[in-house]
Image: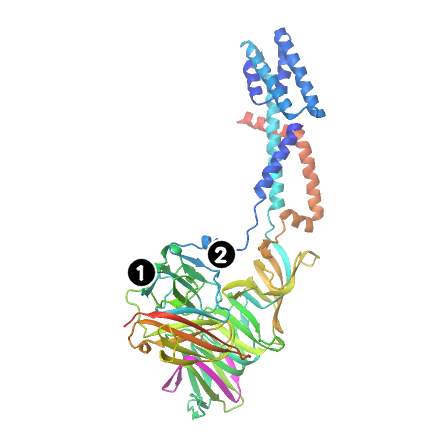
């Protein structure tokens, strides 16, 4: 009888060990990175970076070749860096709907002085899975870390002869609704009246929406170097103004 | 066929069957090997004393182990002295082999039964019926029905951000917003997005929605954003949805329509206007009301409606295959739940588990096949949802802990009588297993072996 009792106890112990699996916990950043790791990037459907709640810069592109699904297209992100530096590349939806996020892996985020390329970034992976076309995506390269406001404009393409665009587009997402606003482009990193190159108006927009600021390359007068874009906005239903500015390096002469 | 006594008892001893070895040796040695028999008797007495001491609890485990080892060692030496020619009858051998096999079958039986009970008891039930009554600020779902939303609803403003063309019916317009009105001979202007600039938009003031049709099996999200002044009834409803084929949104306006444009092209007859940057256009309607038709392409569409929230929108019987109550905030997914209850129950039965949800509590659910939204309405600054159906997975709380009951728990809540009956049968089985049942199984195995 003693043997049967010990046999019962042993079995109960084995079974409780077998079934005492810990409940899966909610995704955390490091776990997200581990499960969404690709060769040169982290990609998936969970956002992790904290941004500016009122306004956020999502994208600064010199060109973005419209891609198609199911054609095995591989995107390359090309950008010019004025110095050797680390960089942070990320892509996300302009309007958050599918919670898409992609960022470069720490193993590839070193840029050399001159032209740099990030890729391959396959279209038929998460982008196809979420039906995200080029016009829904913002792509941004920051010099240094993810908080940096020194931006390097990017060309995104998959073909050997991508279309050329004669303007830069900065895309912003609003955290609050605005009644109106303005943008100003300055030469250099200082915002002075003498360095002001161009100014324009921004219309009424709801919170959560995104809007572009388009900068024709003619505004840069073929001068390569640092430029600063400032966006000043008036919140709807209040007298509060808020603004956002960043500098970017224009490389084309 | 007789078997070597020495070999058989040595084997039994190596398997730890001390008691069996003593009994066999007592039965086989007493006639032919009196000296060895006497030793066995002494060892048997020692073994019985040890068993009694263990039963009474008057011996500590170290002493017990030592005594057992000494008895086993003495028995092993004694077995070595048994003459090689001594045999054990097949019948006697079979008795002990059978005893050992019965023990193995009993252990396997226990393991099997306990495994089954454990599997039933601890694995989560993957099909649970649930009922939800929630207040949320955002809901995202994949609708299995085609939906016509916000039909007949008046809005004080609407921003369109994804459209191929916006056809505006009007008799005259002021394209520069300077009070310089000109006639539109064709009575129609077509606005379109700049082909190379994503994010262009048209913000339309005061109009009535005639039709927004969303196809079946498409993802939709509806979010309510209250105005800065929480007391105000005015707020914003943001709708994102997917379309698999081009479709159209129909609206109507009266009198004059203000349109704030951002990076749009305008076409009237053969004249093309570029509205790069922000421009304000006014259209004038000559009749009671004029039509606006926004043609959308395939893919994801975004609509922003400025409206009186009040009791502004109700939808019933929407079947969904996916549903989420998360919203984006500062590029993170956060809970959009404002309050409510989540109940686990069988259809038409009392709930056996009720979870009260507070603001920002997490609730993640995966419908088994579909969940029916019996009510989806915008009430004030909240989206009210009533839903029921079978769920495959339920998670809640800050750690996303599973709320799926274990199979045993679920059976106990819903089939108490049946489970009790099975439990009693199982206990009877477990009591009988060491004796009669394992004996029967052994007999059957032997019969089968004989046949083979």
Of B86 and A183, nearer the camera is: A183
Q: Give the total number of marks visible in the rendering.
A: 2
Q: Which residue is mark 2?
A: A29
Of B356 and A118, nearer the camera is: A118
Q: Residues within 10 Å of mark 2 (few under 14, many from 20)?
A: few
Res. B98 image quadrant: top right
* Residue B236 image label: none
Label 1 marks a residue whose chain is A
B145 left or right, relative to A42: right
Residue at screen point 58% across, 68% down: B137
Residue B260 magenta: yes
**Is B345 located above or below residue B382 in the figure?**
above
Q: Residues within 10 Å of mark 1 (few under 14, many from 20)?
A: few
Q: Do dots 2 and 1 share one subunit?
A: yes
**Is B34 located above or below residue B425 in the figure?**
above
Image quarter where the N terminus of chain B lies is: top right
Task: Indicate the position of residue B213 as horizontal and vertical percent values.
Answer: 52, 73
Pointers 2 and 1 in contact (C-beta within 8 Å): no
Q: Which residue is mark 1?
A: A112
Residue B438 magenta: no
The colour mode here is: rainbow
Label 2 marks a residue whose chain is A
Q: Is residue B13 visible?
A: yes
Residues shaded magenta: B250-276
Residue at screen point 64% across, 14% down: B43
């Amino acid at each position: 009888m003693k043997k049967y009792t010990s046999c019962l106890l042993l079995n109960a112990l084995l079974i409780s060990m077998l079934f005492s699996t810990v409940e899966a916990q909610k995704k955390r950043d490091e776990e997200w990175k581990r499960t969404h790791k690709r060769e040169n990037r982290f990609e998936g459907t969970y956002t992790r970076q904290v941004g500016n709640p009122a306004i956020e810069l999502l994208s600064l592109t010199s060109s973005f070749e419209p891609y198609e699904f199911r054609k095995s297209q591989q995107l390359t992100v090309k950008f010019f860096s004025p110095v050797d530096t680390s960089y942070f590349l990320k892509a996300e939806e302009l309007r958050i709907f599918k919670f898409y996020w992609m960022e470069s892996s720490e193993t590839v985020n070193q840029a050399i002085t001159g032209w740099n390329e990030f890729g391959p970034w396959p279209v038929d992976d998460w982008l196809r899975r979420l039906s995200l076309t080029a016009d829904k995506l913002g792509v941004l390269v920051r010099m240094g870390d993810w908080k940096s406001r020194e931006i390097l404009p990017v060309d995104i393409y998959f073909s050997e002869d991508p279309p050329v665009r004669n303007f830069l587009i900065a895309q912003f997402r609003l955290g609050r609704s605005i009644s109106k606003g303005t943008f100003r482009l300055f030469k250099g990193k200082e915002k002075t009246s003498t360095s002001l190159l161009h100014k324009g108006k921004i219309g009424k927009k709801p919170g959560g929406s995104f809007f572009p600021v388009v900068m024709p390359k003619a505004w840069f007068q073929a001068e390569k170097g640092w430029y600063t874009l400032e966006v000043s906005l008036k919140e709807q239903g209040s007298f509060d103004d808020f603004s956002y500015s960043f500098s970017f390096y224009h490389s084309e002469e | 066929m007789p078997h070597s006594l020495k070999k058989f008892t040595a084997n039994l001893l190596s398997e730890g069957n001390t008691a069996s070895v003593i009994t066999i040796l007592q039965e086989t040695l007493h006639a032919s090997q009196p000296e060895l028999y006497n030793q066995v008797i002494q060892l048997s007495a020692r073994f019985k004393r040890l068993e009694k001491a263990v039963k009474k609890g008057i011996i500590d485990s170290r002493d017990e182990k030592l005594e057992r080892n000494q008895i086993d060692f003495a028995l092993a030496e004694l077995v070595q002295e048994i003459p090689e020619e001594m045999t054990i009858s097949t019948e006697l051998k079979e008795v002990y082999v059978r005893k050992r096999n019965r023990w193995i079958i009993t252990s396997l039986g226990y393991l099997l039964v306990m495994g089954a009970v454990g599997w039933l008891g601890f694995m989560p039930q993957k099909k649970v019926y649930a009922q939800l009554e929630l207040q949320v600020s955002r809901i995202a779902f994949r609708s299995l029905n085609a939906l016509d939303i916000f039909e007949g609803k008046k809005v004080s403003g609407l921003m369109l951000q994804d459209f191929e063309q916006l056809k505006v019916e009007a008799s005259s317009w002021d394209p520069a917003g300077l009070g310089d009105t000109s006639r539109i001979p064709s009575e129609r202007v077509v606005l379109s997005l700049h082909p190379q600039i994503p994010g262009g938009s048209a913000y339309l003031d005061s109009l009535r929605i005639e039709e927004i049709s969303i196809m079946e099996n498409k993802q939709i999200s509806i979010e309510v954003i209250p105005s800065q002044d929480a007391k105000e009834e005015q707020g914003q409803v943001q709708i994102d949805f997917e379309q698999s084929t081009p479709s159209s949104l129909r609206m109507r306006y009266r009198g004059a329509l203000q349109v704030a444009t951002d990076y749009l092209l305008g076409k009237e007859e053969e004249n093309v206007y570029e509205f790069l940057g922000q421009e304000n256009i006014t259209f004038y309607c000559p009749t009671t009301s004029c039509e606006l038709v926004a043609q959308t392409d395939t893919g994801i569409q975004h609509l922003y409606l400025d409206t009186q929230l009040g009791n502004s929108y109700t939808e019933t019987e929407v079947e969904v295959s996916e549903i989420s109550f998360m919203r984006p905030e500062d590029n993170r997914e956060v809970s959009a739940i404002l309050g409510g209850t989540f109940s686990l129950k069988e259809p038409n039965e009392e709930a056996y588990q009720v979870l009260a949800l507070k603001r920002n509590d997490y609730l993640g659910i995966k419908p088994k096949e579909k969940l029916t939204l019996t009510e989806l309405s915008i009430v004030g600054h909240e989206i009210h949802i009533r839903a029921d159906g079978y769920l495959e997975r339920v998670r809640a709380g800050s750690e996303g802990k599973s709320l799926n009951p274990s199979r045993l728990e679920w059976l106990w809540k819903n089939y108490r009588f049946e489970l009790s009956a099975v439990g009693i049968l199982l206990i009877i089985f477990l009591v009988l297993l060491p004796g009669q049942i394992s004996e029967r199984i052994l007999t059957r195995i032997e019969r089968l072996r004989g046949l083979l």
